[in-house]
């Protein structure tokens, strides 16, 4: 995932260190802006990608030519760099999981090379937010290597940035040990900081009656443990948040058109069994027709959470982050290196997949402990603001 943002200078009514803080005449109108998120195949990525636009004021002060700057195809990234050189004071790169161990295909190595070459053409300061490295669950540095194209890209990022924001200590160690990049700061996922008032809202909610539905999200349809968790969500009539485009969303859409005829995706057939405790065909269809929700705008997603959700859980990192940012409690089911790394860095409540399988939903709700996060909010914000300050960007005050 390589979303980008150009920050324009010189034409805003109020400019701080080259960062436009007020609306510019060239910002798309409300309707055009609303359509931008629909270009993402994973709405969870929007929370990460939109961080530069959400951190300051209402965010649109940092938006120029939004369609081009949000286009993530390699063919237009070079155009984005050219545009930023002509029009921007800084180039912000929201980067998560584009450095990966394993699967070093020719196409991926070429993508690393092209990104490095494009960034080499950048004439303005580069700011990288939340860089994350993805690794297999059973990762061993003696058994896994990065291709030289990835290492060269990391070296360039270290050279061009005053300091590199990374998701967690694992990502920091990869930059240090594989590329010799030492100007690294562990900030956690930057999306965590984009709505500071959410933490006070969460504390108030936790101290009250906690109304609302339970929502569930999942990542891997081929993983039996996640399918088992989905079965629980179906049986309990929880809300299913469909974050990524794919067979589940297509199934939900088809059900709304033809409830009886829509073919069940192969990935869901594992939950259709005749034994007690499994899901009947009619029950599955009714669930995905009535309880599955999908959004094209993050704002609509957050509004729904604030209005209807009292607790969320599952393996989707940013589905739970959206719940947190809406001031509601979430429990992360840490199933891979990125969720483990992010939840550790930000002191977020998490359980493993095996633990989630052993716990009831009620036990999950009762077990959620946000005190470690609350206790560390000040140092977490202090660290993130040190990164922003070093990068020449306005700091974000904690409202708690």
Image: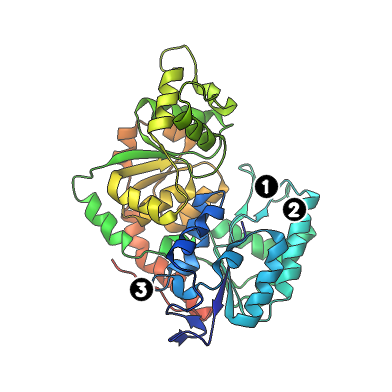
Q: Mark 2 or 1 closer to N-term?
A: 2
Of marks 2 and 1, the one in the foreground: 2
**147 or 245, which lies in front?**
245
The span from disc 1 to disc 3 (Cα, nearest Å) is 39 Å
Q: Mark 1 or 3 closer to N-term?
A: 1
The reply to whether discs 1 and 3 touch (Cβ–Cβ < 8 Å) is no
Instruction: Report the residue marked by disc 2.
Output: 108
Label 2: few (<14), some (14–19) or many (≥20) C-alpha neighbours in 10 Å: some
Label 3: few (<14), some (14–19) or many (≥20) C-alpha neighbours in 10 Å: some
Q: Secondary structure at mark 2?
A: helix
Which image quarter is the N terminus in? bottom right
Residue 24 in sight here? yes
Which image quarter is the C terminus in? bottom left
Q: Residue at horizontal 65%, vertical 70%?
A: 80
Instruction: Report the residue marked by disc 3.
Output: 397
Of marks 3 and 2, the one in the foreground: 2
289, above or below 192, in the image: above
**Residue 400 falls left or right of residue 263:** left
**62 or 210, which lies in front?**
62
The reply to whether discs 3 and 2 touch (Cβ–Cβ < 8 Å) is no
Q: Residue at horizontal 47%, vertical 21%?
A: 260
**Residue 113 falls left or right of residue 97:** right
Q: Residue at horizontal 68%, vertical 62%?
A: 177
Q: Secondary structure at mark 1?
A: loop
Give the label on residue 140, or none: 1
Give coordinates of residue 276: x percent, y percent: 41, 13
Q: Residue at horizontal 65%, vertical 63%?
A: 175
Residue 154 in sight here? no
Give coordinates of residue 348: x percent, y percent: 40, 52
Label 1: few (<14), some (14–19) or many (≥20) C-alpha neighbours in 10 Å: few
């Amino acid at each position: 995932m390589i979303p980008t943002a150009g920050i324009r200078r010189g034409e805003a009514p109020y400019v701080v260190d080259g960062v436009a803080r007020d609306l510019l005449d060239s910002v798309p109108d409300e309707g055009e802006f609303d359509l931008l998120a629909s270009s993402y195949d994973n709405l969870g990525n929007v929370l990460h990608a939109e961080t530069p636009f959400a951190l300051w004021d209402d965010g649109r002060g940092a938006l120029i030519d939004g369609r081009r700057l949000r286009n993530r195809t390699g063919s237009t990234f070079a155009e984005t760099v050219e545009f930023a050189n002509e029009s921007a004071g800084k180039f912000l790169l929201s980067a998560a999981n584009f450095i990966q161990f394993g699967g070093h295909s020719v196409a991926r190595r070429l993508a690393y090379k092209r990104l490095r070459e494009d960034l080499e053409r950048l004439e303005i300061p580069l700011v990288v937010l939340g860089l994350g490295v993805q690794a297999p669950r059973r990762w061993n540095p003696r058994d896994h290597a990065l291709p030289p194209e990835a290492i060269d890209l990391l070296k360039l990022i270290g050279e061009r940035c005053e300091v590199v924001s990374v998701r967690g200590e694992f990502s920091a160690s990869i930059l240090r040990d594989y590329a010799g990049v030492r100007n690294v700061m562990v900030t956690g996922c930057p999306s965590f900081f984009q709505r500071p008032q959410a933490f006070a809202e969460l504390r108030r909610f936790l101290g009250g009656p906690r109304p609302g539905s339970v929502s569930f999200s999942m990542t891997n349809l081929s993983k039996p443990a996640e399918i088992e968790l989905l079965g629980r969500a179906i049986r309990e009539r929880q809300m299913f948040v469909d974050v990524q485009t794919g067979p589940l969303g297509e199934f939900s859409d088809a059900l709304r058109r033809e409830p009886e005829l829509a073919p069940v995706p192969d990935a869901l057939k594992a939950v259709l069994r005749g034994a007690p405790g499994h899901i009947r065909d009619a029950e599955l269809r009714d669930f995905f027709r009535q309880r599955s929700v999908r959004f094209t705008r993050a704002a609509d997603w957050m509004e729904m959470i604030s209005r209807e959700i009292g607790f969320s859980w599952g393996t989707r990192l940013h589905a739970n982050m959206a719940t947190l940012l809406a001031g509601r409690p979430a429990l992360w089911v840490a199933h891979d290196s990125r969720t483990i790394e992010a939840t550790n860095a930000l002191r977020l409540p998490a359980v493993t997949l095996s633990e989630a399988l052993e716990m009831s939903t009620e036990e999950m709700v009762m077990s959620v402990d946000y005190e470690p996060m609350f206790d560390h909010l000040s140092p977490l914000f202090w660290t993130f603001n040190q990164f922003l300050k070093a990068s020449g960007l306005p700091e974000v005050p904690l409202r708690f």
